[in-house]
Amino acid sequence: MQFTQTRTAGPAGDAPESFDKPYTGMGGSSGGVVGMLEVILSDFVRLEEETTSEEATAAREFESFSEETTADKDSKTASEDTKSKSKITKDKELLQAKRDLSGTQAELDSADEYFSKLKPECLDAGVDFEERDARREEEMESLKDALKLLGDEQ
């Protein structure tokens, strides 16, 4: 039994026609391993430059976003404080207005009650307007006469 491989002529010949010259590597005569290392180095340099540029852009964007966010937050905090103080002031004014309304309503109720007691005496005297007017005129004439008498005595 033999374990070594040897070339034997087969039905198609030794090798396919595409392999008629020996393999020289991927770059042909461009340098082999050194050429491949140069390509890797240039790819690495390009990748490093792109990454550095992207990181710088992202840092600027972050700073800009951070400044905008801080300014917006400060603005909203100030607005909240102002609105909170305004609400407290308005609540105090509302409470005072309710107290004033309550006091005024009590005065109005008292005045209405007093008016309802006076109304029968003033309006339901059984005398019409002309008669009251005539009585008032007579009273004014008598007061004028009394004033003249008092004026003469002095």
Image (cartoon, grey):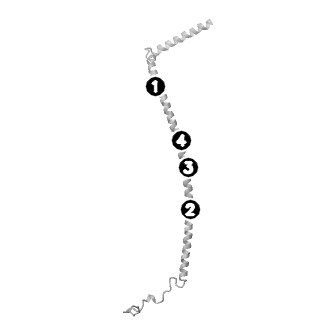
Cα gap from disc 3 to disc 1, whole angstroms: 50 Å
Cα gap from disc 1 to disc 4, whole angstroms: 34 Å
- Dot 3 falls on a residue whose secondary structure is helix
Cα gap from disc 2 to disc 1, whole angstroms: 73 Å
Q: Amino acid at mark 3?
A: Ser
Reading the chain from its start, which is encountered first: label 4 or label 3?
3
* Residue assigned mark 1: 109
Residue shown at the point (55%, 76%) measured from the top left:
41
Determine crowd level at label 4: few under 14, some 14-19, many 20+ residues with C-alpha closer than 10 A: few
Q: Quadrant of the N terminus?
A: bottom left
Q: Position of residue 10 (x, y in %)?
A: 38, 92
Q: Position of residue 123 (x, y in %)?
A: 45, 18
* Residue assigned mark 3: 75
* Residue assigned mark 4: 86
Q: Position of residue 141 (x, y in %)?
A: 54, 10
- Count of numbered badges drawn on the protein: 4
Locate residue 150 relative to residue 120 in the image: left or right. right
Residues marked 3 and 2 touching at CB (< 8 Å) = no
Examine the image and state in which quarter residue 121 appears. Answer: top left
Residue shown at the point (55%, 65%) measured from the top left:
55
Nearest the eye: 84 or 128: 84
The disc placed on residue 17 is none
Residue shown at the point (58%, 9%) measured from the top left:
147
Cα gap from disc 3 to disc 2, whole angstroms: 24 Å
- Dot 2 falls on a residue whose secondary structure is helix
Q: Position of residue 62 (x, y in %)?
A: 55, 59
Examine the image and state in which quarter residue 11 appears. Answer: bottom left
Q: Can you name the residue that lies furthest to the right here?
A: 154
